[in-house]
Amino acid sequence: MSTNNSSGRTETLSTAQLAMLINNAAGFFEAARRASQFVPSGVPGQFVAPLPAAIVCLAFCTELLLKALIEVGGSPAPEWHQLPQLFEKLDDVTKKRIERKLGLSTNETKEMMNDIGSPFVEWRYWHETTGKNIQINFDKLKKLAIALSSDLTERTNIPGITATFAW
């Protein structure tokens, strides 16, 4: 199925493009995993984790996974960054599978998506706000990314996917 979206694109991605999208998502997933680990700070006995980088990478990974699932469902993915709106673009069957993987009801999933919001934009451009206090539940975002990647890998057999999603 081909439909128009905000980008003007009316066709879904080719198999090679979809494989690249999923491989890129896996790369950002791995970057988030590594950035969420504590590393020596340079001061003896002190450790830091570059969490803003982990959040941005995991948020972008989640965005790419949602877009891949939209594409697999037969629609061209929009160029939005808002995770709740992207989730709403999924077909109903996919939404239900994700809800089951998350162990949440439809209302709980909508609440979770709204709580997560648009972290890719919020955290990437935080410096442009006037000291806005932003928060995110990293574990919820991670759980969502894992559920999306699990669903995507279980239901597709796309040649050229070389990446894995393992935390």
Image (tube, helix red, strand yellow):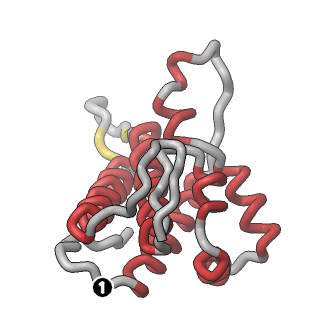
Image point 63% across, 16% down: which residue? 131
Is residue 146 visible to the viewer in this orientation of the structure?
no
Q: How many marks?
A: 1
Q: For this rendering, which residue is in front, 111 or 42?
A: 111
Answer above or below: position of 24 versus 165.
Answer: above
Image point 75% across, 62% down: which residue? 110
Amino acid type, label 1 = Asn
Q: Quadrant of residue 11?
A: bottom left
Question: Is 158 left or right of 75, judged from the image as shown?
Answer: left
Q: For this rendering, which residue is in front, 158 or 46?
A: 158
Find residue 118 and report its horizontal and vertical position in percent: 59, 43
Answer above or below: position of 146 versus 114.
Answer: below
**Mark 1 sits on what residue?**
157
- Mark 1, residues whose alpha carbon is within 10 Å: few (<14), some, or many (≥20)? few
Find residue 33 and report its horizontal and vertical position in percent: 36, 57
Is residue 167 visible to the viewer in this orientation of the structure?
yes
Q: Secondary structure at mark 1?
A: loop
Image point 50% across, 26% down: which residue? 125
Answer above or below: position of 145 versus 94.
Answer: above
Q: Quadrant of residue 17?
A: bottom left
Q: Residue furthest right?
A: 107
Question: Is 85 left or right of 152, judged from the image as shown?
Answer: right
Find residue 105 and report its horizontal and vertical position in percent: 78, 76
Image point 53% across, 16% down: which residue? 128
Q: Quadrant of the C terminus?
A: bottom left
Question: Is 78 left or right of 95, judged from the image as shown?
Answer: left
